[in-house]
Image: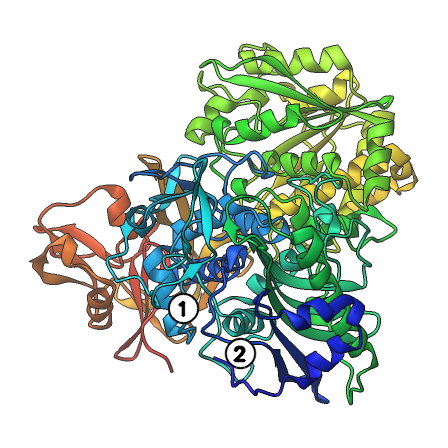
């Protein structure tokens, strides 16, 4: 692959300067099958790199067993495959369940090492680099597939590489050709399914490869060479090129690159260089997983800590007496960088599988000494320009950017506590069960059963902390309001983590005792409806306590008598902050305890705490904070909690542009609630001005999903200039979600706003016509629909109207075969119409979706 000069003088001469370390290697380079590639990196004034490689004993045709180094390109290809799939909801953090369908295959449906309790490509890659986990590699190999792996290697110019089997499990050739079926899921929903695949292609073998003079099979010694013909192989130059393609993507070499996003690169940089001691989920015991556990070059098997200014982006391998390290090494303090790849073979008795390899005596010292030799040389090597390493300055799980106050740390380091498995709104009780179970094993946490819902689903209480100030938090008393529930499990992760923010979390846990009900209405959550299984609104059942869920909440409050309560809800996405064009993404309320809305000491404390939370959130979602209506409701829990002596804060999560699953608002709940708990622990909130509470703008309801402005609407023989406000309502059919539009208002809507707005000034709004021939639903494609719309048709006739979900998702409206006329857009109708300028149809609105048909 690389253009190799036979001039090996640099590396050989460097090693000769340390005969005590390298004399045996230099004398017996072929016995040890040593190969080394050292690449110098020089930057220009724009930080662009250039490379010069030096070789020692390198032979691209000499076979060595690559061991775990094959994991690196498979990890890259797994991310690349995800990017090319472009399936909504499927990314590296999505839960990936592996099934079994062929001999030798095993299934993976859970992952106890992950914060989510579920397997995911991101977590597999993390374990693959940090501790070289074999099963993680196997699952990625099964996702990408043997055929695709090797086709991609060839397409990218890695002509001599082959990856044709799993690791640590012994399967025959046919079993390795078959890769498991996998499913990406979100709760009960299957987002994408990939069936079992068999590779029909001939394996890319390069002739017979025999090694040694014997090997152990079972308990017997077989006295003949061991065959490596059907094992993986990556030549050392191609291995380094693969790493270079990710460290320096696209640099004058488009063929060898991987199709990754910038976020993918940052993800890889973190976990290629992160140490076991810097890792959460799982936490690796330092006695076994020392810093150099997967960093052979420079450190061998030293147990001492690696200096933090040195970062090694690498992948190691160790098996059958072979030891390999393929690394990009950076010294941030001294502005040093270089690439170094090396392999050595230690098998003195030439017997394989007997466990007698000279790793400790030869291989580890060689790797350590070689790395240190090149590093010392680089320290003294002259450079015209120092490198800028900002691209590689990533956050590590336990090495966080720390500010003096808590909330910037929460915001900046949110990804370390995030729970990707709950990245969707329609969560059910069974979706949170793995996290409830995990909470039972978290240090300082207690989980108990409070009771059951109407339909018998368990309702839990999670307790954390040992402080004098008691705080009760309850979420999802309305089954379709899940935003805060998702944030609570991220709060658990924060409180249970061991990292640079310990000073903040320790204070919270020392000064407060938290009582948390993550999901009060699991029956409502099951069908994603507001009310419980008795059709009762739990937030209107605080007096009569008809529902078991309401009784549970009341009994919990009475038992612990918390000083503070957090009532966690979702509100309509159509609320805005009063007299602004910004959504009320988060709204607060200190509920009234009487009709007069008096402010006693307890309600005043809640108001001050809200002022503090508002100040914080204004930094992240400025102008998008509202104040909920404080009219006293004698049946509501929040109002009664305030009345019963618990200082209550209502948090309502509304809408946020471009965030249909409310991921950003989960983050805002995470930041706001933890900030509030810190304020309570420190008693800082009491210094906030109470009257600032009333300066938070009230909620208003002035947002449409689509607002068409200034269109010319034909009525009674003439055109009138009107605005049209359209809502898109969420519907569910057989567990799948779709949207159904309706025209809510027409006329002067100049004081309203839209998530999407279209100025139809100077254009006519017309109903369009019905395409005359009857068509099959299966014939309605995006391309054909576009042609019909451009021709002035907004509907087509079909023999049989399909179900509502199919109808709502088609790119054009459908009508029965007998219908011939469409009526003009009007109140309550589905939003289907055309917007034309002159004789040209510029836009179509189909079920509330805007389709642009012609540019200017």
Residue at image mark 2: 250
- Is the C terminus in the top left, top right, bottom left or bottom right quadrant? bottom left
As drawn, the label of residue 153 is 1
- What residue sits 79% from the left and 35% below the top? 677
- What residue sits 45% from the left and 30% below the top? 529
Q: How many angstroms separate mark 1 from mark 2 (CA)? A: 16 Å
- What residue sits 25% from the left and 79% below the top? 839
Q: Quadrant of residue 851?
A: bottom left
x%, y% of residue 508? 83, 33
x%, y% of residue 845? 33, 61
Front residue (pair 94, 3): 3
Tell me the element at label 1.
Answer: helix
Q: Relative to 655, is 821 above or below?
A: below
Tell me the element at label 2.
Answer: loop
For the image shown, how many numbered marks are present on the structure? 2
- What residue sits 47% from the left and 25% below the top? 524
Q: Is residue 639 visible?
A: yes
């Amino acid at each position: 692959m690389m253009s190799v000069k036979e001039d090996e003088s640099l590396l050989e001469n460097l090693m000769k300067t340390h005969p005590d370390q390298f004399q045996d290697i230099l004398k017996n380079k072929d016995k040890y099958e040593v190969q080394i590639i050292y690449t110098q990196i020089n930057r220009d004034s724009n930080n662009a790199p250039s490379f010069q490689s030096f070789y020692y004993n390198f032979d691209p045709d000499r076979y060595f067993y690559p061991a775990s180094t094959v994991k690196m390109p498979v990890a890259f290809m797994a991310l690349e495959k995800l990017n090319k799939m472009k399936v909504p909801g499927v990314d590296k953090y999505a839960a990936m369940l592996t099934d079994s369908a062929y001999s030798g295959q095993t299934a993976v449906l859970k992952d106890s090492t992950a914060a989510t309790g579920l397997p995911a490509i991101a977590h597999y890659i993390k374990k693959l680099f940090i501790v070289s986990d074999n099963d993680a590699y196997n699952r990625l190999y099964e996702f990408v597939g043997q055929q695709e792996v090797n086709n991609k290697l060839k397409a990218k110019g890695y002509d001599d590489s082959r990856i044709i089997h799993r690791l640590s499990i012994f399967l025959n050739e046919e079993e390795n050709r078959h890769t498991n079926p996998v499913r990406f899921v979100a709760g009960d929903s299957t987002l994408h399914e990939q069936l079992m695949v068999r590779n029909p292609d001939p394996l890319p073998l390069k002739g017979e490869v025999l090694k040694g003079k014997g090997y152990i099979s079972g308990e017997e010694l077989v006295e003949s060479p061991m065959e490596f013909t059907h094992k993986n192989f990556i030549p050392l130059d191609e291995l380094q090129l693969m790493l270079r393609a990710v460290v320096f993507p696209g640099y004058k070499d488009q063929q060898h690159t991987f199709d990754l996003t910038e976020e993918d690169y940052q993800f890889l940089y973190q976990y290629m260089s992160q140490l076991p001691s810097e890792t959460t989920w799982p936490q690796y015991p330092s006695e076994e997983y020392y810093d150099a556990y997967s960093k052979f070059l420079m450190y061998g098997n030293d147990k001492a800590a690696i200096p933090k200014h040195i970062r090694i982006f690498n992948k190691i391998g160790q098996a059958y007496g072979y030891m390999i390290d393929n690394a990009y090494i950076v010294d941030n303090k001294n502005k040093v960088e270089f690439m170094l790849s090396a392999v050595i073979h230690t098998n003195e008795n030439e017997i394989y599988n007997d466990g007698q390899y000279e790793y400790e005596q030869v291989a580890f010292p060689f790797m350590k000494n070689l790395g240190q030799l090149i590093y010392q040389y680089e320290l003294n090597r002259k450079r015209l320009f120092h490198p800028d390493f900002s691209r590689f300055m990533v956050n590590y799980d336990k090495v966080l950017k720390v500010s003096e106050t808590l909330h910037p740390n929460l915001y900046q380091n949110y990804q370390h506590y995030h729970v990707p498995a709950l990245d969707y709104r329609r969560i059910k009780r069974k979706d949170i069960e793995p996290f409830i179970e995990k909470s039972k094993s978290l240090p300082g946490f207690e989980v108990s059963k409070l009771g059951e819902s109407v339909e018998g689903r368990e309702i839990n209480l999670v307790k954390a902390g040992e402080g004098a100030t008691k705080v009760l938090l309850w979420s999802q008393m309305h089954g379709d309001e899940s935003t805060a529930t998702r944030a609570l499990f991220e709060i658990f992760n924060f409180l249970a983590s061991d990292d640079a923010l310990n000073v903040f979390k320790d204070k919270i846990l020392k000064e407060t005792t938290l009582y948390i009900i993550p999901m009060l209405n699991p029956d409502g959550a099951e069908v994603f409806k507001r009310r419980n299984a008795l059709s009762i609104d739990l937030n209107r059942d605080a007096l009569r306590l008809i529902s078991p869920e309401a009784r549970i909440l009341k009994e919990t409050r009475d038992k612990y008598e918390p000083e503070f309560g957090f009532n966690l809800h979702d509100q309509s996405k159509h609320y805005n902050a009063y007299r602004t064009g910004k959504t009320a993404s988060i709204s607060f309320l200190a509920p009234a305890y009487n009709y007069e809305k008096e402010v006693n000491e307890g309600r005043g404390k809640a108001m001050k705490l809200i002022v503090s939370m508002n100040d914080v959130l204004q930094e992240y979602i400025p102008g998008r904070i509202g104040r909920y209506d404080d009219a006293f409701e004698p049946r509501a829990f929040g109002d009664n909690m305030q009345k019963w002596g618990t200082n209550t804060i209502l948090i309502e999560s509304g809408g946020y542009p471009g965030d249909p699953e409310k991921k950003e608002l989960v983050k805002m709940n995470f930041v706001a609630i933890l900030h509030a708990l810190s304020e309570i622990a420190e008693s800082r909130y009491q210094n906030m001005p109470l009257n600032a509470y009333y300066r938070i703008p009230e909620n208003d309801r002035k947002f449409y999903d689509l607002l068409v402005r200034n269109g010319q609407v034909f009525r009674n023989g003439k055109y009138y200039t009107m605005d049209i406000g359209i809502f898109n309502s969420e519907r569910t059919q057989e567990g799948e979600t779709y949207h159904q539009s309706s025209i809510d208002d027409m006329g002067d809507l100049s004081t309203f706003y839209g998530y999407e707005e279209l100025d139809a000034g100077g254009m006519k709004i017309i109903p369009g016509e019905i395409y005359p021939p009857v068509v099959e639903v299966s014939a309605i494609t995006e391309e054909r629909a576009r042609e019909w719309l451009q021709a002035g048709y907004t509907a087509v006739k079909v023999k049989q109207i399909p179900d509502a979900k199919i109808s709502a998702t088609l790119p054009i409206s459908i009508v029965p075969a007998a219908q011939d006329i469409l009526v003009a857009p009007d109140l309550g109708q589905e939003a289907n119409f055309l917007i034309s300028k002159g004789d040209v149809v510029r836009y179509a609105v189909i079920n509330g979706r805007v389709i642009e048909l012609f540019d200017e």
